[in-house]
Image: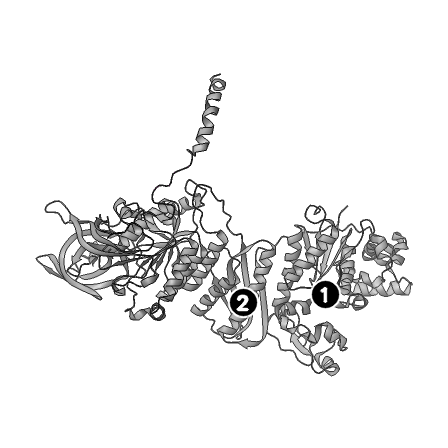
Amino acid sequence: MTAPSRLPLDLSQLPGTIRWGHSLPAPAQGGAGLLATGHPEIDDLLGGGFPRGRLCEVVSHGSAGATSLAQRLLAGVTREEHLAAWVDVADAFDPASAVALGVELRRVLWVRPPDLAAALAATEMLLGTGGFALVLLDAARTGRQDPGAGKGRRMLSGTHTWLRLARAATRSQTALVVLPGATAGAAGLAGAAAGMRLDLSPVRAVWEGAPGAPPLLEGLVTRIEVARHRGDRGGGERRASIRLV
Amino acid sequence: MPRFACIVVPRFLVAALLRAEPELRGCPLVLCRPDGAGRAGAQRRTIPGPRSILAGISREAERLGVRVGMTVAQALVRHADLVVRPVDEHAARAAREAVLDVACSISPRVEPERTEVEGGKGFEEAAPDEAHASGSAVCLDVEGLGGLFVGGGAVAAAISARAERLGLDVGVAVADGKATARVAAGLAARRREAILVPPGGDADWLAPLPLAELAPVAAASGGRGTGASWSASYESFQRLGIRRIGDLARLPLREVGSRFGADGARLWRIAAGEDGTPLVPSSPALEFTEGVSLEYSLDSLEGLLFLLRGLLDRLIHRLAIHGLSCGGLRLILDLADRGRAERVVGVLAPTADVKALARLTRSVLESDPPREAIVGVRVVATPDRARPTQLDLFRPSGPSPERLATTLVRLAGLCGAEKVGRPIAPEGYRPEAFGVARFDPPSSSSTARAPECEESEDARGEPQEPLHSARAALRALRPPRRAQVFREGGVIAYVRAPGFGGRAVISGGPWRVETEWWSDRPCCRDYYDVQLSDGGIYRLYCELAPPKSRERTRTEPERWFVDGYYD
């Protein structure tokens, strides 16, 4: 018999709840057009995350942590229930370490093209499909100097391919992240087509362990510099040394 | 009151070939079977000879005086520029299935005409277009379809339109009785317009028609010696002065039955509009087949792909009228040495994109070409439904299922089917192990894990934690690279491998992995993480002998590999 007496009170509270949208889940991180990595320092450095609809290039050398950064982004994207695609020219994606970094593999489409030309075609197909929040092109070890790149090397000689991919990313509102690898040189692969470019350089590897025991690789400290961020109104230099993992 | 529709394909064998090779339309085309060979012999490549009997002729050939039953030599005397082709059994089978597809897309109760119609006296007179054709007619129950099609005219129009989409010109009729619909459909095919027999008016509509019009239904009764039986009955009716169907209906049933037997009584019932033959429905096909026989040997892949493109196009049209997509393909190639080759084309997700399927087929044929020239091709498609999706207001929407399916198929054609999918780490303790599963993203509306995903993950095991505790992402080197490792005081001092090398700055390990010792490929390794002076941090392992033989192989040199680096 208590229900009727409480009912008017509940009904009186209902309009306020609906008006303010309390039942709607708030976006976890980042802005509407940003994909957060879930790493606070990186997201702050990038102004909230990787922008959707842009081509972003992550240039790195050696074990600087570009793959860790990309997998962190992948983890953040899949955690938000978006779909992502990893175009893996080098066939270097390791599912076990991706899971350890929090990637939800069932939301990841893994494509292993035979060469860079096929990888570019696959990337364009994925961007044209739409619905993927993130398409990650891992072109490491297949840069301009790679003799095995074949047709892909010729395609990379001009920026028209990258401009086309950037336009496709804009149309589909997908964040296209390119890992060009060390062989691409300091300028990266996409050149002027990249809306954002991060330069990563290794600072140190973090080894820890008890005395007398073999040390364990615990993480990587990397210097991240935002070399280009088109549309960024923050101004000023953006660089920081961040422990990625 | 029951209502039946009947679909008849006039000049069935010719229509089947024209559907496969539309460029022959308008040609004086004649089809023949090989000299003295039966139907079984026609399954293979056949070359028409001068004594081959014509089994089908086009309208253009008929206008030139050519008739079914002539030999090729006789036909060529009438007109030297006839296009002579063997009967294409693959194309005929595909056309038969296409007619059934049209019928099944209209009504769930469909019965194909099962009789081998060989013609006979009165048959060519009544239905010359159908002589020597088999399976060219399909009956369907259209009772209760008023909610979908308003009136019999709408049903007939829908049938004609769908058949036209599949490359077939058909005659359609709707009547109360199955046999009446069959007779009317034959007439409609010749008149090139649909015939709607008014409800309850079968007998009145049939009455003025010549008795010969009953030939198809007499042949379709399936009795023993059907053709001869109809010829004898027809001659007897003619002698008795029974010229029209109405004349037969006016005779007493008892007298007709006593003189002409059960077949005669059945004809009387049809003529009187009292045909109660039930429709015997057949189950719809689970596979869709399109094929073509060649009169030449095809030894170029490009030519074969050109043929396949047409076959795929027709298959997709047939699937489309059922609202289905292609979930898998099988190619059956008849080889010139009378052998047969089969290729399975895996389709990652149901799709109706002909271009993507053609690309996928090309990649399969390029990777495994047939050993001999081709004389016949069949493509069998497994139907599947595109995955539906339920959108959610509060969650991100993924790609549309159809577009995703098409993309997956195109990606598989570009990279190979095994190179596209969802990454998984299979059960086990081999650090380098990985797998690829079908990419079937969970619905955006499901808050919990999709059951199939759970099952899949459980079945294959959750990915193992990466070896020891390294938390940086590993870039795998597949296959692992052989390395040379130099030690100083038992500690790794220098590493050299193809593409990199340097002094070891710091190293961690070893971490021993012993697994699958029960199998033929035991895995016994010591793993190390080594940071080299080139700035890279690599994962190395030393291959060990299995425990049982370790003593014996102690003197053998160590085998080192680099299977990845941290980045």
Circle 2: element type? helix
State yes or no: residue A235 in magenta: no
Q: Residue at x 56, y 60 (%)?
A: B316
Return the residue nearer the eye: A40 or B328: A40
Label disc, if present, on residue B494 of the rendered structure: none
Q: Which residue is mark 2?
A: B309
Q: Residue at x 60, y 54 (%)?
A: B322
Labels 2, 1: one chain: yes
- Residue B163 lies in what quarter of the image? bottom right
Please report, as a chain letter, where disc 2 is located: B
- Residue type at the position of mark 1: Pro
Residue A82 higher or lower than B73, as above or below: above
Counting the numbered discs, the total is: 2
- Residue B207 lies in what quarter of the image? bottom right
Q: How many C-alpha atoms fall within 10 Å of the one at disc 1: few (<14), some, or many (≥20)?
A: many
Q: Residue at x 46, y 32 (%)?
A: A18
State yes or no: residue A26 in magenta: yes
Is residue B460 visible in this depiction of the protein?
no
Please report, as a chain letter, where disc 1 is located: B
Q: How many C-alpha atoms fall within 10 Å of the one at disc 2: few (<14), some, or many (≥20)?
A: some
Is residue B247 visible in this depiction of the protein?
yes
Q: Which residue is mark 1?
A: B10
Q: Percent from the top left, x then y, of residue B81? A: 69, 81
Return the residue nearer the eye: B87 or A129: A129
- Whole-Å distance between the Cαs marked 2 and 1? 26 Å
Question: Which SS type dominates the magenta stretch?
Answer: loop
